[in-house]
Image: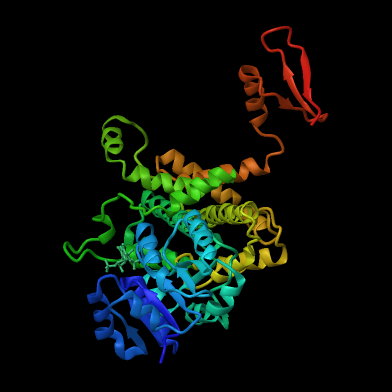
């Protein structure tokens, strides 16, 4: 019997995906550069389903039915290219390589071009859900040709998470679209975690300890903020340190790590000209947290308030923070979805934005109640310019405005750094302002660089003779 599908890479993600496929009744060929890992998977999990383990790549490829579907789940980057190189000589036309690692979408565009030129399909596939998700049902974001999705789609949908009978897996678009959407998923994940962190720090400033904060997050998880990250925040905050018996989070070093997807999201947004302030602030907050030299010298030299807040009504303050968290989160999501929409147009992918929200409702790290709402809004209006202006969102942002402003003010007054709370409010205010300070910027640019300005009352571009007689000339009609 031949395998229905193959998986290369038997580290935590690949082995769990292979097991998930086997649990769903597929016969799974498995391969790892270091054979011992393949043997280990067979020894530990071989009885969970039908696996065919191979020591050589040739045997591995030969063990899969044609047209072959082969998932690569190795360390993103050079390892992916090396694995593709090894596979290619054994493939036949029509075979499909899926790269399910966290590839940079431009690498996926390149690989798809090279591989499709050889007569094979290449499906750059975003997978989110961590190791547990990979085993029990991740959110899956495949790109590539629609023909290849006809073959691999049913298998991917079978192993994905489900909401009711809807799979958390949908074809996203050609070549790099799947990895692009996964990249922005991760960018949004950064901002989701940052707003949670800011809320926690504000609660702390108001004298709320970790155990009490854990209860607060638990109660927030019962309402509109309900999400995986809020749920596990309650768990992390209530964890005691196995060594000292105190609160674990208080002994974890406050230096955040990152692997690159947040940075890519922001770099790409800069190239596309899409303001993703919340995501950018989250990436920079992680960078600042790890900037040891800066923090050491700043702690010695910079003065300011001591990050404590006097709150007369604690319950009211907690509710303010909840509302500010919801508003900031929604604005950060709005920016992320804006990047998806703009990137989808720019790269010619025609991404169905509602589908992205749909497949993030479960399985992935940012799974949240809010995503059902987002899905409905983009389904109702696929050309929605900004999520924050959607019919069900804008009124709630209005309702939460006062609390949001009070919390940002409290952060500023007390010296708590809350970059996403405040930058998302600044983004909101900039977007809704009938006039903004860009008029002065244009005046200045024309002053020092003759960059010209447009007028509100007539078409064309104009330049003022700033250093001469201050006469105005029209430099172009459009
Ligand atoms: P790792 O990212 O730790 O990669 C280990 C795997 O890559 C092993 O199978 C290893 O083989 C293989 N490998 C390496 Br390293 N260099 C290779 C090469 N030159 N040729 C062939 N194979 C090579 O594994 P992971 O944590 O399971 O993640 C796999 C992918 O999934 C990554 O792209 C990751 O970004 C992505 N991802 C991870 C998560 C998560 O929560 N961890 C979530 C979503 C996506 P060896 O055993 O012979 O060294």
For the point 59% across and 78% down, the residue is 150
Q: How is the image coloured?
A: rainbow
Residue situated furthest top in the rendering: 469
Q: Residue 306 lies in what quarter of the image?
A: top left
463 displayed left or right of 358: right
The residue closer to the viewer here, 52 or 287, is: 52
Q: Is residue 217 above or below residue 321?
A: below
For the point 64% across and 17% down, the residue is 447
The residue closer to the viewer here, 311 or 157, is: 157
The residue closer to the viewer here, 283 or 220, is: 283
Q: Is residue 424 above or below residue 305?
A: below
For the point 49% across and 77% down, the residue is 160
How many labels sit on residues?
0
| Residue 329 placement (x, y as % from top left) | 53, 56
For the C terminus, give its image quadrant. top right
Q: Residue 38 lies in what quarter of the image?
A: bottom left
**Can residue 368 be seen in this snapshot?**
no
For the N terminus, give its image quadrant. bottom left
| Residue 116 placement (x, y as % from top left) | 54, 65
The residue closer to the viewer here, 78 or 85, is: 85
Ligand 1, seen in the image, is in the quarter at bottom left
């Amino acid at each position: 019997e031949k395998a229905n599908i193959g998986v290369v890479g038997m580290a935590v993600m690949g082995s769990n995906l292979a097991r998930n496929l086997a649990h769903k009744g597929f016969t799974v060929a498995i391969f790892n550069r270091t054979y011992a890992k393949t043997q280990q998977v067979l020894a530990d999990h071989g009885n969970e389903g039908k696996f065919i383990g191979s020591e050589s790549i040739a045997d591995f490829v030969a063990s899969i039915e044609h047209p072959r579907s082969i998932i690569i789940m190795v360390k993103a980057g050079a390892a992916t290219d090396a694995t593709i190189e090894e596979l290619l000589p054994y493939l036949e036309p029509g075979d499909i390589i899926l790269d399910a690692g966290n590839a940079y979408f431009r690498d996926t565009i390149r690989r798809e071009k090279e591989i499709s030129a050889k007569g094979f399909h290449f499906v750059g596939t975003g997978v989110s859900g961590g190791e547990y998700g990979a085993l029990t049902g991740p959110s899956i974001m495949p790109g590539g040709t629609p023909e290849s999705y006809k073959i691999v789609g049913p298998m991917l949908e079978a192993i994905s998470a489900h909401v009711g009978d809807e799979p958390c897996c949908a074809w996203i678009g050609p070549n790099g679209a799947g990895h692009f959407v996964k990249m922005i998923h991760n960018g949004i994940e950064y901002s989701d975690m940052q707003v949670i962190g800011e809320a926690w720090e504000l609660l702390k400033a108001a004298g709320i300890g970790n155990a009490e904060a854990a209860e607060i997050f638990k109660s927030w998880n019962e309402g509109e903020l309900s999400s995986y990250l809020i749920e596990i925040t309650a768990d992390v905050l209530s964890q005691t340190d196995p060594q000292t018996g105190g609160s674990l989070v208080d002994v974890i070093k406050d230096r955040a790590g990152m692997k690159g997807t947040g940075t890519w999201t922001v770099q790409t947004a800069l190239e596309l000209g899409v303001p993703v302030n919340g995501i950018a602030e989250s990436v920079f907050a992680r960078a600042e947290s790890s900037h040891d030299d800066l923090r050491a010298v700043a702690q010695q030299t910079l003065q300011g308030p001591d990050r404590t807040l006097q709150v007369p009504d604690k319950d009211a303050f907690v509710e303010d923070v909840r509302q500010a968290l919801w508003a900031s989160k929604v604005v950060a999501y709005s920016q992320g979805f804006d990047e998806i929409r703009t990137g989808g147009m720019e790269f010619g992918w025609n991404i169905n934005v509602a589908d992205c929200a749909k497949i993030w409702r479960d399985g992935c790290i940012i799974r949240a109640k809010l995503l059902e709402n987002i899905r409905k809004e983009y389904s109702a209006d696929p050309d929605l310019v900004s999520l924050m202006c959607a019919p069900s969102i804008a009124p709630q942002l209005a309702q939460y405005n006062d609390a949001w402003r009070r919390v940002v003010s409290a952060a500023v007054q007390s010296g708590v750094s809350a970059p996403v709370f405040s930058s998302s409010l600044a983004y909101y205010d900039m977007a809704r302002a009938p006039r903004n300070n860009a008029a002065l910027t244009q005046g200045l640019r024309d002053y020092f660089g003759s960059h010209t300005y447009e007028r509100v009352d007539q078409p064309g571009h104009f330049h003022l003779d700033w250093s001469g007689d201050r006469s105005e000339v029209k430099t172009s009609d459009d």
